[in-house]
Image (cartoon, helix red, strand yellow):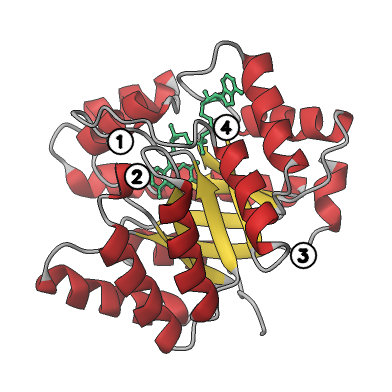
Amino acid sequence: MESQKKFTPTFSFELFPPQTQQGVEKLQLTRKQLALFNPKFFSVTFGAGGSTRERTLETVLEIQAEGHVVAPHLSCIGSTRQNIRAILEKYSQAGIRHIVALRGDLPSGMAQAGEFRYASELVAFIRQEFGSSFHIEVAAYPEYHPQARSAQADFENFKRKVEMGANSAITQYFYNADAYYHYVESCELAGLNIPIVPGIMPINKFSQLVRFSDACGAEIPRWIRKKLEGYGDDSESIQAFGLDVVTDLCERLLQAGAPGLHFYTLNSANLTSKIWQRLNLTGHAD
Ligand code: FAD
């Protein structure tokens, strides 16, 4: 973990583009609450296969107009170079300087893979077309991506993304700190010298956590799963236990030298704020 300690810690909040006017208003309130913590940036997800392209753009511009730093996610699967170039040009003209570059997943029923196969190709494309205009974040998987042929092949992919020009990484969420330490040490050994910020998923509903984790390959350790299962429909106990587990995880990660935290807020300030306050974090001065 030594090499990560030299980076200034970055705290950021991930949001998704709302689908309804009610969702837009809820998100404005969430942002107002979370902005009090002075995050380095808000990031906004991009739906599979470009399904939220316009809504992502709208949300990004709205957040930027409020004076916050915002990092749009951009996934390339199912897209052409021309499409991706057009989106990046819009962001560039709007003064956006930070992108989370992803492959994404093809939505069911969408047969066309498009002109990009992997996120490393997107990173290379952004560098080729836009030079160093954007700070590029990429995804990292301490418990490995579910489609990876092997842990080694997945790590080689991460290395390629860094070699193509990624500036920093955000991890898939995990509840097993050792997986993150091991991953970061592998990066150190491979000479990959970028911040790898842990992605943090607060625990809200057990069924939702199981669904997300099955899809993205994050492991819910048995003892956590058993405890959550045992609470049944008692959402108060689930959240209270989840807060203890996730706050403790964040504390241990920061003490070990993690260069910040990226919260998957799911557009709600409630649990993220509680974790933040328990950790006594101060955010960014600028
Ligand atoms: P890649 O880095 O391209 O990797 C995908 C898979 O391909 C891996 O298994 C990798 O090992 C393999 N691979 C890569 N290169 C090669 C190669 N040359 N040969 C063989 N195999 C290879 N999804 C969204 O739709 N929208 C979002 O906004 C979004 N935001 C995210 C934010 C974060 C921080 C994270 C961690 C994930 C996010 N995702 C999002 C999910 C992500 O899109 C999926 O996990 C997707 O399956 C992989 O995207 P990637 O960028 O990690 O892909």
**Nearer-N-terminus badge (4/1):** 4
**Residues tagged 2 and 1 counted as in contact (Cβ below 8 A):** yes
Between residues 35 and 229, which one lies in front from this camera angle?
Answer: 35
Q: Give the alpha-carbon distance from disc 1 to disc 3, as whole Å.
A: 30 Å
Q: Amino acid at mark 2?
A: Ile
**Nearer-N-terminus badge (1/3):** 3
The residue singled out by tag 3 in the image is: 8
Residue 127 in percent (x, y) is at 68, 54
The residue singled out by tag 2 in the image is: 203
Q: Describe the element under mark 2 as helix, strand or loop.
A: loop
Graded by Cα atoms within 10 Å as few (under 14), some (14 to 19) or many (20 or more), the crowding at tag 3 reads few
Above or below 23: residue 76: above
Q: Of circles 2 and 4, which is in front? A: 4
Residue 231 in percent (x, y) is at 21, 33
Q: Amino acid at mark 1?
A: Leu
Between residues 69 and 132, which one lies in front from this camera angle?
Answer: 132
**Nearer-N-terminus badge (2/1):** 2
Graded by Cα atoms within 10 Å as few (under 14), some (14 to 19) or many (20 or more), the crowding at tag 4 reads many
The residue singled out by tag 4 in the image is: 141
Graded by Cα atoms within 10 Å as few (under 14), some (14 to 19) or many (20 or more), the crowding at tag 1 reads some
**Nearer-N-terminus badge (2/4):** 4
**Residues tagged 4 and 3 counted as in contact (Cβ below 8 A):** no
Q: Give the alpha-carbon distance from disc 4 to disc 3, as whole Å.
A: 21 Å
Q: Give the alpha-carbon distance from disc 2 to disc 4, as whole Å.
A: 19 Å
Above or below 109: residue 95: below
**Residues tagged 4 and 1 counted as in contact (Cβ below 8 A):** no
Q: Give the alpha-carbon distance from disc 2 to disc 3, as whole Å.
A: 27 Å
The residue singled out by tag 1 in the image is: 209
